Every structure is written in C-alpha cells, then in structure tokens.
Image: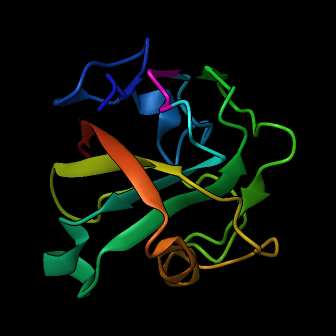
Amino acid sequence: MTDFELESSEFYTGQEIPKKYGYKNDNVNPPLTIKGVPPEAKSLTLIMDDPDAQAAVGKVWVHWVLSNIEPTITEIQESFTPSGATDGKNDFGELGYGGPAPPDKRHTYIFKLYALDTKLELQKGVTKEQVESAMEGHVIEQTILKGTFAP
C-alpha cells in the first residue's frame, strides 16, 4: 500500500467547502492535490457525491465524475479539467463539476479518488453508474476527501 491521498488547499477533510465552489455561486471545482499514486496505476477516476441528499431527494446526488485522469497528475487546479480526462455527467444534467447545493441543511460531500490498473473505455457524458461498473475489478487503491457545505 502507498500513501495515496487527496487533499485541497481550500479545505481540510471534514471542514467547510468555501462558498465559491457551490453550484449557486462560482460553481468551479476546488483545487485538488493528489499524492502517493500507486506506481502500477494506469489511470485515476474521481467521483464527488452527496450521500446526505438521500434524505432530501431520495438518492445520492452526483456532483462530479471524471475518469481517465493521467496517474502522473499531482494537481487538479481550480476550475480545470486535466487534459485527456473524460468528463462524466452530474445529476444537474451537465458535464463536469457541479458544486454543492444542499436543498435543506448542511450536507457532507465526498470526493473519492480511485487508482486503477487500466484506462477505462468510456465516452464523454458517462454516468457514475457506468464508471463504477467499468472500474469493477480494476481498483488498486482508493482515497477520500470530505467537506461540508450549508445552504
């Protein structure tokens, strides 16, 4: 096992995600730093979702699906999609990042980063479910970053 980590310079795990990253604000992704990618990784996949939405809207709300990130990438800059990565569709019906937008109270948002032993054969606009299905049996390691956001 490596020290596979996902961090942000804008918030620590469990802390408040700054308002500018919210869907109704600037709606840009926060900067992310990737550390300790396993040497055998062929690609990375990032999924951001809101499990707390289950109570409010009846499902885990998907905010960001990004696959086929090069394993040599150490930073995803603010408002930036790494070249070569495949943008998936979020639950706002859009490609790319859709920021936090809790309908009721403070929610927890989970950024899940997966190191995979393959590059996924996926098209732009892929759903979280399609990505998870394609990743099956290919996850070497996973790390998470959690943040909270209140309306």
Quarter in which the N terminus is drawn: top left
Q: Quadrant of residue 134?
A: bottom right
The residue lying furthest to the top in this view is 9
Magenta span includes 35: yes
Q: Picture coordinates of residue 111 (x, y %)? A: 38, 46
Residue at 55% x, 30% y is 39
Q: Quadrant of residue 83?
A: top right
Q: Is residue 7 above or below residue 56?
A: above
Magenta span includes 30: no
Q: In terms of secondary structure, what is the magenta stretch mainly?
A: loop
Q: Picture coordinates of residue 151 (x, y %)? A: 28, 48
- Tell me how the rendering is colored: rainbow
Q: Picture coordinates of residue 74 (x, y %)? A: 61, 20
Q: Is residue 58 left or right of residue 39?
A: left
Q: Is residue 57 above or below residue 4?
A: below
Residue at 69% x, 69% y is 94
Q: Is residue 33 above or below residue 103?
A: above
Q: Picture coordinates of residue 113 (x, y %)? A: 44, 45
Q: Is residue 30 above or below residue 122?
A: above
In the foreground, 17 or 84: 84
Q: Is residue 133 left or right of residue 109?
A: right
Q: Is residue 35 left or right of residue 2?
A: right
- Which segment is the magenta one? 34-38
Residue at 64% x, 77% y is 93
